[in-house]
Each structure stands twice: as structure tokens, then as C-alpha cells.
Image (tube, grey):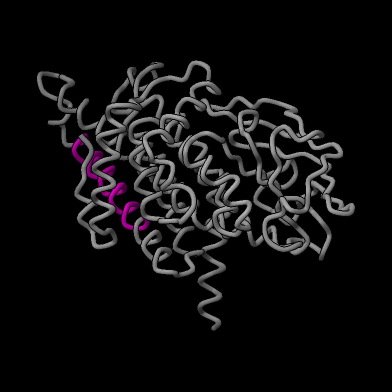
């Protein structure tokens, strides 16, 4: 069973503790770790399952960062694809929840919360990942429409989404100040799935191509040229939740390591009886708990209305890098079993790697933290 001591921390309220207990029971019964068969079908099924059970409403609409983090930690502990399904519904619709018009919210958000519509966030491009200012996908304004041309890649839920929040260059100003955000329905003429992308952990990803894709200006989120701000506001919420997912993976790895160490016999004693094993377990547990403190501090601060650019970056940096170390140690402790397909720790090893890259790679988080520290020093 996972360690629930963190629920007593003052960062959380009683409603969060109730929420976590209920989701823990549900996840244990419905989304146990399993290898994906048809990834697209499995993801659609999980979205609907999460929607029918009411969990997706915590990812969309009114944003409670701590609830989102708790959900991602718990779901990641039990099933990486379930965490992915939950998170992408929130990220894909987050811009609409935060800055959409009442009409946009009414049209999209309830369907996302019920699991009836799958959402996607389309920011990255072949030559523009961490450097959003290099974005090239163009949105030419023609009357009451924007005409989109270009590509997006590494798009989560690509190919299965019912709509995409697409960021394109509309040219109001140079760099990031000339980007706008549009909601593009998946069946819009001129939008095509150029490529399905297979990655180390089975998740639905795709490259999108836009060719003369006409989108009504009523589908724009925020004002012209404010797309970068829309994207950053959305990522500020969900960057902390990436750290929470890493925390869930790390907690599961620690649990698996403890269970294996107490059961595995070597040289007439349990693996857990060796001091080397105990030292490694101590290091793993300390990494997990220190990451958790950073995660829930950042989530608590954001829910109090604070800007958490630095704190979210610290949480993501520490939790994702720490989880990689904890999971690697769990695999090592399992010996040959650790790399056997079907073992939980083997699945975790594949799941964690991408979290050190997406929504801002580790190196980008270091730059953000350093920049924010210097900014504070100069003011």
C-alpha cells in the first residue's frame, strides 16, 4: 500500500484528503498497472472511465492545483496511461478554462469533464520546442477566419483528440508577442494527422499538418497576439502536476523495491537485511519525500494566488530527476526481473524518461530557476 503520511501536511485541506482517499480506492479497483494493447483505444477507454466516475471535473473548469497534483500522483502510482489520460484532458482544455469566452467554455469544457470529448494542446513544432519564440506555424487573418498553415509535433492525444488548442504566429509583433491561440476541431478541413509517433512508453502522440485550415476568429482564445501568455498560464498550472506524476511513479518504485527486498532471499538472508540495501532504500525514500515537499509547496502557493514560476520549476526539476534515480535503483534492486517486460518497475522505467523532457526539459527548468533568482536579487 502507498504511504499516505503526506496527506497530513499543512499544504492540504480536509477536502483534499477526502478526495485522495476516494481516488486511491477507485484507482486500485479500476486502473491497475497493465501494458497497453491498442494505445489509442486504451486511452479513449480511460478518458471515458475517468469521466464517468467524475474525476475529470477536477482537471478542467475551476482549477485546484493541489487536487490536480493529488490526482496525477495517485493515478501515476497505479497506471501511467491513466495519469496521461487525466492530465491531457486538463492540459488540452486548460487554456479554455483559464481564458476562454463563456461560449467556448460552454461548448467544450463540460464535454471534456464528462470524457465525451478528448482535448489536446498543440504548441511544439519540429523546430520550436522549448524555444516558443521560434514557432513557425502561421495563422493568416482573412475576414472573420484565420487560415492556418504549418506543422505541430509531439502532440499528446494527437490522432484521437476531438479538438486541439493550436498556437500559431499571427504577426501582431515580433517573437512571442505575435502568437495567437485557436481551438481547432479535429474534423476541420485542412487539418490532417501527418504521422503517428511511437515512444518508449505507449502514449498516443502525433505530428499534425495544417494546409489552408480555416478557423473562425470566434475560436480564438484571448486577444490577438496573446497566445504565448495563454500557453504559459496553462503550463504554469500543469508543470507542477508533471512533478506530481513523477512523484507517483517514484512512490510506486519505492513500494516495489521494499516489497522485493523483504521477499528476495540471498546468501541465507533477505535482500533487505544487507546494509547496502538499507542505505539505498533510505536514499530513495529521502528523495521521494523531499520531492513531495517541493510539489505540494508549489501547488499550495499557486492555489493561494501566487505566481509560482520558480517554485514550479524547482518541483519539476527535483521530482522528475529524483524519480529517475529512484526508479533506476528499484530496477537494479530487482536484478534480472527489473528489465523483464511485464514487471511494474520495467514499466516505470519507460514511463519516467519523458517527464524529464516534456513541458520544459530539466535544463530549461534550471535556466528558469536561475533567471528568477537573479530577478529577485536585482529588485
Q: Is residue 226 above or below residue 265?
A: below
Farthest residue to the right: give it: 142
Q: Quadrant of the N terminus?
A: top left
Q: Is residue 290 magenta?
A: yes
- Tell me if 322 is positioned left or right of 127 in this view: left
Q: Is residue 115 magenta?
A: no
Q: Is residue 273 above or below residue 140?
A: above
Foreground of the two, 313 or 161: 161
Q: Main secondary structure of the magenta part?
A: helix
Q: Is residue 312 above or below residue 252?
A: below
Foreground of the two, 114 or 268: 114
**What residue sits 81% from the left and 41% below the top?**
150
- Name which quarter of the figure residue 97 lies in: bottom right
| Boundaries of the magenta span | 276-295
**What residue sits 52% from the left and 37% below the top?**
354
Tell me where residue 158 appears, x and y as whole percent.
64, 32
Tell me where residue 48 appears, x and y as whole percent.
46, 30
**What residue sits 13% from the left and 24% below the top?**
270
- Tell me if 231 is positioned left or right of 271 in this view: right
Q: Is residue 341 above or below residue 85?
A: above
- Name which quarter of the figure residue 54 lies in: top left
Amino acid at each position: 500500500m502507498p504511504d499516505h503520511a503526506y496527506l497530513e501536511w499543512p499544504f492540504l485541506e480536509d477536502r483534499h484528503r477526502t478526495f485522495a482517499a476516494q481516488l486511491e480506492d477507485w484507482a486500485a479497483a479500476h486502473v491497475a498497472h497493465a501494458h497497453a494493447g491498442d494505445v489509442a483505444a486504451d486511452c479513449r477507454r480511460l478518458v471515458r472511465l475517468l469521466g464517468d466516475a467524475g474525476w475529470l471535473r477536477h482537471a478542467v473548469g475551476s482549477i485546484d492545483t493541489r487536487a490536480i497534483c493529488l490526482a496525477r500522483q495517485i493515478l501515476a502510482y497505479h497506471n501511467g496511461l491513466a495519469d496521461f489520460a487525466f492530465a491531457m484532458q486538463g492540459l488540452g482544455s486548460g487554456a479554455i478554462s483559464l481564458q476562454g469566452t463563456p461560449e467556448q467554455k460552454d461548448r467544450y469544457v463540460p464535454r471534456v469533464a464528462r470524457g465525451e470529448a478528448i482535448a489536446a494542446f498543440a504548441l511544439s513544432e519540429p523546430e520550436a520546442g522549448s524555444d516558443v519564440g521560434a514557432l513557425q506555424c502561421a495563422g493568416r487573418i482573412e475576414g472573420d477566419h484565420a487560415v492556418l498553415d504549418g506543422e505541430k509535433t509531439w502532440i499528446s492525444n494527437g490522432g484521437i483528440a476531438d479538438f486541439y488548442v493550436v498556437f500559431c504566429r499571427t504577426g501582431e509583433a515580433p517573437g512571442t508577442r505575435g502568437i495567437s491561440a485557436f481551438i481547432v476541431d479535429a474534423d476541420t478541413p485542412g487539418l490532417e494527422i501527418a504521422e503517428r509517433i511511437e515512444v518508449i512508453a505507449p502514449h498516443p502522440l502525433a505530428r499534425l499538418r495544417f494546409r489552408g485550415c480555416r478557423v473562425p476568429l470566434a475560436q480564438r482564445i484571448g486577444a490577438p497576439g496573446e497566445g504565448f501568455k495563454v500557453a504559459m498560464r496553462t503550463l504554469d498550472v500543469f508543470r507542477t502536476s508533471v512533478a506530481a506524476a513523477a512523484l507517483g511513479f517514484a512512490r510506486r518504485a519505492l513500494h516495489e523495491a521494499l516489497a522485493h527486498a523483504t521477499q528476495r532471499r540471498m546468501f541465507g538472508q533477505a535482500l533487505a537485511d544487507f546494509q547496502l540495501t538499507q542505505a539505498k532504500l533510505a536514499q530513495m525514500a529521502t528523495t521521494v519525500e523531499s520531492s513531495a515537499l517541493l510539489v505540494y509547496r508549489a501547488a499550495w502557493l499557486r492555489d493561494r494566488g501566487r505566481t509560482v514560476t520558480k517554485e514550479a520549476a524547482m518541483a519539476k526539476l527535483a521530482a522528475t530527476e529524483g524519480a529517475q534515480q529512484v526508479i533506476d535503483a528499484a530496477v537494479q534492486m530487482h536484478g534480472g526481473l527489473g528489465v523483464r517486460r511485464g514487471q511494474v518497475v520495467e514499466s516505470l522505467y519507460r514511463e519516467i524518461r519523458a517527464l524529464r523532457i516534456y513541458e520544459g526539459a530539466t535544463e530549461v527548468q534550471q535556466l528558469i530557476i536561475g533567471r528568477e533568482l537573479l530577478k529577485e536579487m536585482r529588485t
